[in-house]
Image (cartoon, coloured by chain):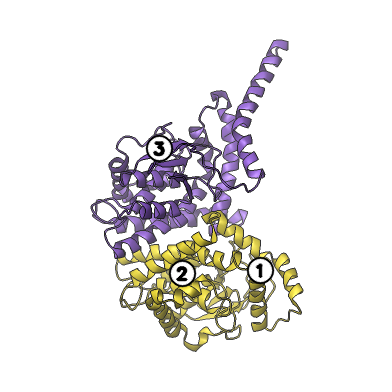
Chain colours: A purple, B yellow
Amino acid sequence: MLGCDCCCISSFVYLVGVLTIASKVVPFLLKKFNGEKPLELQEKIFKKDVVYLYQFGGTPTASSLSPFCIKIEAFLRLHKLKFERRNTFSDRGQNGQLPFIELNGEIHSDSQIIIRRLTQTFKLQAYPDEQTAAIGHAVDRLIDNHTFNLLMMSKHRVVGEVVVAGADGVPSFLLPLLAAVAGRYMAGVMTNRAQVSIGKFKENEYNELLRHMEMNCRNDLLQLQTILGKKKFLLGDEPTAVDCTVLGQFGSNYFAVPSARFYLHDLLDSSEFAPLKEYDDRVKTQIFGDEFCHRK
Amino acid sequence: MILGKKEGKLYEENYENDVVYLFQFPGTKTSPSISPFSVKVEAFYRLHNIKYKKRNTILGRGTNGRLPFVELNGEIISDSQIIIRRLTEKMQLQAYQDAQSAAVGHTIDRMLDNHTFKTVHLCLIIHSKLDKLGALIERIALSNRVVIPSASANKEIHSRVDFHSRLESRVTTSIGSITEEQYKELLRNDVLQLQTILGKNKFLLGEEPTSFDCTALGQLGVAYYTTPSLRTSLHDLLDSDECTDLKKYVERRKESIYGIEFFYAHAKA
């Protein structure tokens, strides 16, 4: 402590810091604690047949930090539907999660249900035939309900960096604090979510669990690569809905924050998974062009 | 064999070599276990003629805090997916015809265990009245000859065992809190897609049974047969004209893998 001036300034700095964090966190907490209110439309004046996509923001290398948000945007682009992005931190759909969409005055939540509603409303052909649709559905559920959880468990050590990458408008001197605090919190949420599905191994079994999960994760990717085979996309020469799901998971985990490397990067960068990695790049370029990045 | 033991210690102290001891939730008069993962694992042993013995337990748990788990030659293996993979390696079983069908089978397996399972349970547990859960527990108890005096005692058990909220949080954490109608929609979609994959085949992947048929028997069989009087949307689906093929397939699986022993036989197999 050098003197009075420095004390005042550092207190002031901390105050600014706390207020900045509070301005993001408090509305979110308030919404959580105020309980169930029927959701109001966010878009008071909406254009007909335009999808308003409420999602987590992205990074310079990914359109969102959330795999389910990327999936929905990819699906909208794939079927050339008109949409507008609304990046948000504290808004939530009726299921308490993001993404959700507003379309013609109706709110739809849960990415699986959103895709079904869009397919019905715009009479889209999601897959060329029934058999392919069935397989596409099974792959979609594998990735979103199984691989996703395995990736979450593996990723929690680097989640601090991921939070920082997505932190929009937070002053840079606060970032280490944010990484530590929010990173800790998110890691807990992610681990809990995965454990609920996979099971909770004891502390001393943790490395065993990690090994098993990494084995299962690698197995999922191997199976995915086998299904891909020599094709351009998972189910044929044209991308389908399930390619959007895959882009979601790989986009958020592999492309979003290249410095937050974890097990998935080691796998995809190895020669064993070269075909799968090429396929990821192909899907990204075909569906997003060079727009796979954060946009206001 | 109702209470649990300290972790790390083997339950089966005097074990026979190369016999798998399957620790699982008990069943009811109409199903070998109330857990689809236990039925999956048991069906797998029967399919491959692996020697096994059943040990019913309610509070026992494997190293991942779940049931089923197995003990084999003094080693504890937890998590049904890992159990099946380990046994396939150890016994050098020829699991699948080719890599492509194995891959498709794997996706079906994961869909059933990680998604369909949750939509089925949500329909049963959360959106039905609590009485149904009580009736389920009562039925299990009766099948195991444990006396539960009255309905109010059921509620005691609920709160102590805490099934309801734990199950609910398990499902909503993974899928999210969508409405009952939406769960039913997702369940129906899963079931119809499965039926499409089955097509005119005898088994999910063709003319030969695979472990994925065991998974399907576990998820659909347990949900359908365990407590037939507690009808859920899965019952309505399987009994409808839309799903005749799938229902026949589940019945065929049950008959050929278990025969009469699907109906609850006492603890030791």
Q: Are marks 2 and 3 on the same chain?
A: no
Q: Determine whether, in the image, residue A209 is placed left or right of residue A138.
A: right
Q: Is residue A266 visible?
A: no
Decide which of tag 2 and tag 1 comes sooner along the chain: 2
Residue A115 visible to the viewer:
yes
Residue sitting nearer the eye, B23 or B25: B25
Q: Is residue B150 left or right of residue A209?
A: right
Residue indicated by mark 2 = B84
Which chain does the numbered disc 1 sit on?
A: B
For the point 62% across and 25% down, the residue is A17
Pointer 1: residues within 10 angstroms few (<14), some, or many (20+)?
Answer: some
Task: Report in which chain the residue with disc 2 lies.
Answer: B
- The residues tagged by marks 2 and 3 sit, at their Cα atoms, a distance apart of 46 Å
Residue A168 at what x, y percent from top left?
50, 30
Disc number lying in front (3 or 1)? 3
Type of residue at label 1? Leu
Q: Quadrant of residue B34?
A: bottom right
From this view, report whether residue B169 is shown above or below residue A181.
below
Residue A84 is tagged as 3
- A280 lies above or below A199: above
Q: Residues within 10 Å of mark 2 (few under 14, many from 20)?
A: some
Under mark 2, the amino acid is: Ile
Depth check: B197 or B256 in front?
A: B197
* Element on which disc 2 rests: helix
Give the residue at the far bottom of this rendering.
B260
Percent x, y of residue B1 = 67, 77
Which residue in the protein does label 1 denote?
B130
